[in-house]
Image (cartoon, rainbow, N blue to C red):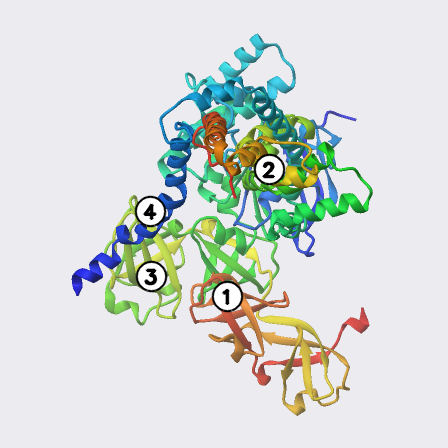
């Protein structure tokens, strides 16, 4: 009896459900992607799929296009998000909670529904769907992921640092660029990572907002994976994307050391 | 116009917050060039607000601040020739030591060679040579404080403002830094304004001390003035240990307290004027006396009794002596601290290099020049403006109080009256709900044989209470005033 209790109360026991979950839904799929990428349709080992990717100009172009869209989206989110976060973090700003809530509120609803609603909105206003609509939709979906980490770092920042800058002769503009911006970089990094990565691999938003006219890398992967005889090639594309994203996040981590990151 | 000797002039500055409370209430202060001035007071007294108004981080609600004769009341901080050393250092964590110190110089666009030279000199002044490339978060608290000082003085300000700069350091480090700051002040020759809640720091460092409480300046003076001649109970109580007693000024140079008459050196209080008397614990001389005599003796004639060790260190002469029994004795390092109780129930705190064990009968005397006399700020009675209500009660300090019907005989309901309540007859209850009104113990003064409390009611009125019960600062109390203690008079305001 005691022994059972002992086992039940040990931390190791409680970890098992999580380990099982991770193995099933994170590790196993990763292994499967790897296995499919290195095999042909009959299950024999091959690296022909990789060779195909590097000579497949459409895939590479789509990839570059996706990265470009993601860069644009990240830049727009940063340009809109930073000032919003800055204003919210000001001490004399009376209702930061309400504002944060308003930014978070759309996220209570599934992003697909929101995207469908965006499509309707564009139709209602008689605006054409396409690249512009795509960027609008992406920005709408990912803006909170930019605002929140930046708001977090700005809010935690010691106000006396800004006062110290004023005291040493910096005007508002100078103290913003020389103190506030450098100190909020950890938040900016996590904001960038959290917006950039999911945008590169997005596909549903692109499909809905461009009537499937613009293909992003995510849509391409989806196309191949749902086509039985191209499954292995789809796996290669996934793997390539995974590695690229892994690399960017690795760079992001390095540049800020073991900084607090400021994620939600 | 002649040359203005003051570098900083603060004229009738008040700072009111949104909730209507005053952080500063009509504060005026002049600082001479090169002076080391300390603003001293308990937390929440407004000292930091005053400093921030001088630095420009806060704008005074009224009054003005002059720097070198120029009105800077509304000038932003980056245009003032002052620099601040912040309480928590406020070093920029993304810059190394060199770039932190060079921050102000780079903004002024000085050339790199000059910057290098100036930074090196400032770091040398602050004893931080060789730390240029270090990240600030790898430095200890004391080192960070030195960098903060270097960062401020490198800009060659005319006034250096220091906001409790040593409060985050440990005791030993604090003492070392105090000496360094004093040396730095002499080397630089600029004006230092230093905010602290540590009275020892204030007394050791400054040329002048400004004692503040509740947004007001209570006294400005040299450290010796502040210590030896406190102008009011707050200063006497806040600076060092003291025995504060209620007394009466019989005539010039003659004061009565504890039922005895003493010679003193103060004049000009008038005759038979109630006063507060302050005696520092180290100013009372102690010697051992034969025990059986003590009970029966008191008064000046007691000097004739058998004294066991009237040693050389007790001054000879015609001094008023009094007697008591040592209650407790604590070794404090250099001296012993004793509590001595007289047969009439007055307790004295005394510091002496000699140990007198509890139970020892001792004689005490104090030299006339060590008796500090202060005007009483208030005595015996609380006075309130009130009004007789329809239901036969009296309304004052935002509450209705029960009185006997005969007390309000001859007063019309609604009539304005003046209410007088003796300090002694107010009862304080442990449970707030047992009182007609509730409040908080705001200030405690031990007067030798009783406590003199200031109770601040929830509505913000101050009531003075004398009691023998022990309360702590911040205790919540219920206030009860028995009907017999309330005396009602026709309001005098109509005659004014």
**Horizontal arrangement in the rendering, residue B372 relative to residue B20 (left or right):** left
Q: Visible in this render: residue A147?
A: yes
Q: Secondary structure at mark 1?
A: strand
Q: Which badge, 1 or 3, comes first in the chain's sequence? A: 3
| Contact between labelled residues 3 and 1, with CB atoms less than 8 Å apart | no
Q: Chain of mark 4?
A: A
Q: Nearer the viewer, mark 4 or mark 2?
A: 2
Using the image as rendered, state which of residue B363 and residue B430 is in the foreground.
Answer: B430
Q: Residue at x 49, y 46 (%)?
A: B228
Q: Nearer the viewer, mark 1 or mark 4?
A: 4
Q: Nearer the viewer, mark 1 or mark 3?
A: 1
Q: How many marks?
A: 4
Q: Which badge, 4 or 2, comes first in the chain's sequence? A: 4
| Contact between labelled residues 2 and 1, with CB atoms less than 8 Å apart | no
Residue beneath disc 1: B452
Q: Secondary structure at mark 2?
A: loop
* For residue A41, above or below residue B337: above
Label of residue A19 in the image: 4
* For residue B310, above or below residue A75: below
Using the image as rendered, state which of residue B260 and residue B219 is in the foreground.
Answer: B219
Q: Residue at x 64, y 42 (%)?
A: A141
Label of residue A203 in the image: 2
């Amino acid at each position: 009896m005691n022994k059972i209790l002992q086992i039940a109360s040990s931390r190791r026991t409680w970890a098992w459900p999580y380990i099982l979950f991770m193995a099933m839904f994170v590790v196993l799929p990763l292994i499967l992607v790897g296995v499919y990428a290195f095999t042909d349709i009959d299950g024999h080992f091959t690296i022909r799929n990789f060779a195909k990717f590097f000579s497949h100009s459409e895939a590479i172009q789509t990839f570059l296009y996706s990265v470009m869209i993601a860069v644009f989206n990240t830049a727009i989110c940063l340009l809109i998000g930073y000032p919003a976060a800055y204003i919210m973090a000001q001490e004399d700003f009376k209702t930061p909670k309400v504002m944060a809530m308003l930014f978070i509120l759309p996220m209570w609803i599934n992003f697909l529904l929101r995207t469908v609603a965006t499509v309707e909105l564009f139709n209602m206003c008689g605006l054409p769907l396409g690249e512009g609509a795509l960027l609008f939709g992406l920005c709408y979906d990912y803006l909170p992921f930019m605002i929140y980490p930046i708001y977090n770092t700005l809010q935690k920042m010691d106000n006396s640092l800004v006062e110290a800058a004023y005291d040493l002769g910096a005007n508002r503009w100078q103290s913003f660029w020389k103190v506030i911006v450098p100190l909020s970089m950890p938040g900016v990094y996590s904001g960038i990572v959290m917006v950039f990565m999911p945008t590169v691999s997005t596909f549903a938003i692109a499909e809905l907002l461009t009537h499937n006219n613009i293909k992003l890398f995510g849509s391409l992967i989806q196309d191949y994976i749902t086509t039985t005889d191209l499954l292995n090639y789809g796996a290669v594309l996934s793997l390539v994307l995974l590695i690229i994203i892994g690399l960017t996040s690795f760079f992001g981590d390095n540049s800020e050391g073991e900084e607090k990151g400021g994620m939600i | 116009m002649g040359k203005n000797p003051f570098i900083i002039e603060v004229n009738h500055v008040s700072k009111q917050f949104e909730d209507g409370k005053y952080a500063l209430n009509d504060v005026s202060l002049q600082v001479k060039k090169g002076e080391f001035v300390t603003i001293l007071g308990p937390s929440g007294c407004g000292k930091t607000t005053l400093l921030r108004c001088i630095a420009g981080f806060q704008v005074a609600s009224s009054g003005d601040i002059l720097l070198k004769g120029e009105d800077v009341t509304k000038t932003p901080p980056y245009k003032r020739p002052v620099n601040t050393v912040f309480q928590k250092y406020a070093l920029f964590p993304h810059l190394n030591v060199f770039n932190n110190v060079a921050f102000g110089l780079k903004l002024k666009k000085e050339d790199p060679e000059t910057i290098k030279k100036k930074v090196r000199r400032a770091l040398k002044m602050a004893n931080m040579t060789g730390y240029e490339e270090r990240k600030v978060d790898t430095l200890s608290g004391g080192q960070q404080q030195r960098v903060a000082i270097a960062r401020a003085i490198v800009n060659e300000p005319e006034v250096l403002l220091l906001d409790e700069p040593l409060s985050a350091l440990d005791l030993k480090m604090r003492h070392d830094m105090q000496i360094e700051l004093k040396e730095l002040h002499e080397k630089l020759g600029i004006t230092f304004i230093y905010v602290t809640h540590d009275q020892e720091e204030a007394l050791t460092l400054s040329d002048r001390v400004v004692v503040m409480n509740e947004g007001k300046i209570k006294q400005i003076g040299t450290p010796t003035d502040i210590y030896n001649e406190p102008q009011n109970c707050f200063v006497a109580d806040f600076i060092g240990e003291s025995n504060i007693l209620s007394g009466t000024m019989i005539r010039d140079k003659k004061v009565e307290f504890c039922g005895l008459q003493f010679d003193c050196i103060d004049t000009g209080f008038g005759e038979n004027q109630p006063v507060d008397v302050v005696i520092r614990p180290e100013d009372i001389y102690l010697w051992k006396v034969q025990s059986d005599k003590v009970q029966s003796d008191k008064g000046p004639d007691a000097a004739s009794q058998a004294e066991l060790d009237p040693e050389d260190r007790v001054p000879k002469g015609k001094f008023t002596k009094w007697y008591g029994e040592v209650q407790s004795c604590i070794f404090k390092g250099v001296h012993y601290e004793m509590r001595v109780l007289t047969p009439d129930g007055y307790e004295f705190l005394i510091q002496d290099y000699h140990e007198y064990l509890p139970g020892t009968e001792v004689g005490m005397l104090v030299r006339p020049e060590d008796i500090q006399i202060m005007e009483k700020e208030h005595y015996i009675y609380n006075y309130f403006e009130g009004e007789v209500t329809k239901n036969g009660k009296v309304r004052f300090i935002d509450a209705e109080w029960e009185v006997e019907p005969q007390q309000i005989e001859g007063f019309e309901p609604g009539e304005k009256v003046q209410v007088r309540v003796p300090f002694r007859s107010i009862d304080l209850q442990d449970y707030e709900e047992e009182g007609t009104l509730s409040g908080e113990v705001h200030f405690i003064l031990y007067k030798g044989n009783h406590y003199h409390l200031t109770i601040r009611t929830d509505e913000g009125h101050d009531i003075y209470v004398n009691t023998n019960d022990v309360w702590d600062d911040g205790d919540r109390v219920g206030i009860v005033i028995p009907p017999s203690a309330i005396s009602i008079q026709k309001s005098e305001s109509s005659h004014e």
